[in-house]
Structures are given as structure tokens and as C-alpha cells.
Amino acid sequence: MSHSTRCAACKSLRRRCPKDCVLAPYFPPTNPQRFACVHKIFGASNITKMLEQLPVHLRAVAADCMSFEASSRVEDPVYGSVRIISRLQEQIIEAQSELVKTKGEIAFHNAQQQQMQQLQMIHAIAQEGEDQHSWLSSSQQDPLPNVNQQPLQDYNYSNTIFGFEF
């Protein structure tokens, strides 16, 4: 007994579509171009053999894969889906490179922020220390008086080491 409408495969092959047609669920009459493309690349008997060898739950995925590979081969007879895969791998590599670059920029920014916070903390501690120990006020004398009271440019350094003459 045949279907009321033949599947795309049976229409293309100009045969009756049996009730147990292996190709009917995967090549409906509404999409004849799908079967034509797959038939052109793989051939009807190979498609049927491949689908019959698979468990029923995997046949739809296999038909989709055959359809994708066939349409890729029609577009690019030399490389087929390999060209698409290569482009995707290039995009993955570019995205990974961009991710590494972005992570580096984030790490650099975080290091700058941390350094700025440390400098602010040091400045705050120094400011607090000056406020608490105001030992350098304008009324006090120089905390380190010049012992020699001699200008540095007039001092003879040629024969002295650590203040000892020789």
C-alpha cells in the first residue's frame, strides 16, 4: 500500500512510495530539494543502506548530517564542510586570543587599582603620622644640623673617606 502522497525520494526516483519507506520520514514531499541534493552526492541506494544500518532513533540525525554534507559539497565541491569547520576553528582561535588579551588588560587594570589603593593607604598613614607626631613644626630648628657648618662645595673630598683624612 502506498502513501497518499509520495515522499520526495520516491517522487524523484519515480517510484511508488511503500508504507515502510525508509526515506519518507526524512525526505518529506514538502522539501524535494533536500533529497535532490543528498541524492546527487551520495546516491539513493547508499542513502537507503546507511539509514537501514542505523537504529531508528539515530536516522533523523544521520539524514540531517547527510543533507548538510551534501549541501556543503554542492556549494564547495573540493572542501565541502571542511571549509566551514576551518572557519569556525579560526574564529575560536581569534576568540580565545581576544579573551587572553582582555584578561591581560583586566589583570593590568586590577594591578593599577591595587597599586593606587596601596599608595593612597601609605599616604593616609603618613598623613596620620604627621598629624600625631608633629615634631617638625616651624618653631623647631633643623632636626639634622650640619656638623661642619661648612658649605659642601668648599669641602675638599679628595683625601678623605668617611671623614678620615689620609
Image (cartoon, rainbow, N blue to C red):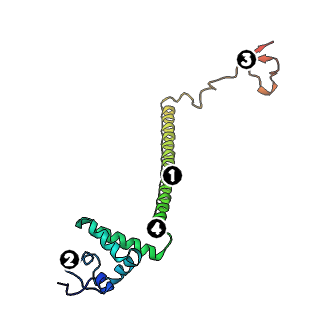
Q: Secondary structure at mark 3?
A: loop
Question: Residue 85: x, y in percent?
Answer: 45, 64
Question: Residue 72: x, y in percent?
Answer: 44, 73
Q: Earlier in the sequence, mark 3 or mark 1?
A: 1
The Cα atoms of the two marked residues, 4 and 1, are separated by 31 Å
Identity of the amino acid at label 3? Phe
Q: Is the residue marked by circle 2 packed among few (<14), some (14-19), or many (20+) residues within 10 Å?
A: few
Q: Earlier in the sequence, mark 4 or mark 1?
A: 4
3 or 4: mark nearer the eye: 4
3 or 2: mark nearer the eye: 2
Q: Is residue 42 above or below residue 8?
A: above
Residue that mark 4 sits on: 84
Q: Secondary structure at mark 1?
A: helix
Question: Residue 45: x, y in percent?
Answer: 33, 75
Q: Is residue 46 above or below residue 16?
A: above
Q: Is residue 19 left or right of residue 146?
A: left
Instruction: Name the residue nearer the viewer: 22 or 73.
Output: 22
The Cα atoms of the two marked residues, 1 and 2, are separated by 62 Å
Question: Residue 58: x, y in percent?
Answer: 27, 65
Q: Earlier in the sequence, mark 1 or mark 2?
A: 2
Residue that mark 1 sits on: 105
The Cα atoms of the two marked residues, 3 and 1, are separated by 50 Å
- Residue visible at 33% across and 71% down in the picture: 64
Q: Earlier in the sequence, mark 4 or mark 2?
A: 2
Could you say which disc has been placed on residue 20 in the image? 2
Whether residues under marks 3 and 2 lie with C-beta atoms below 8 angstroms apart, the answer is no
- Residue visible at 49% across and 69% down in the picture: 79
Identity of the amino acid at label 1? Glu
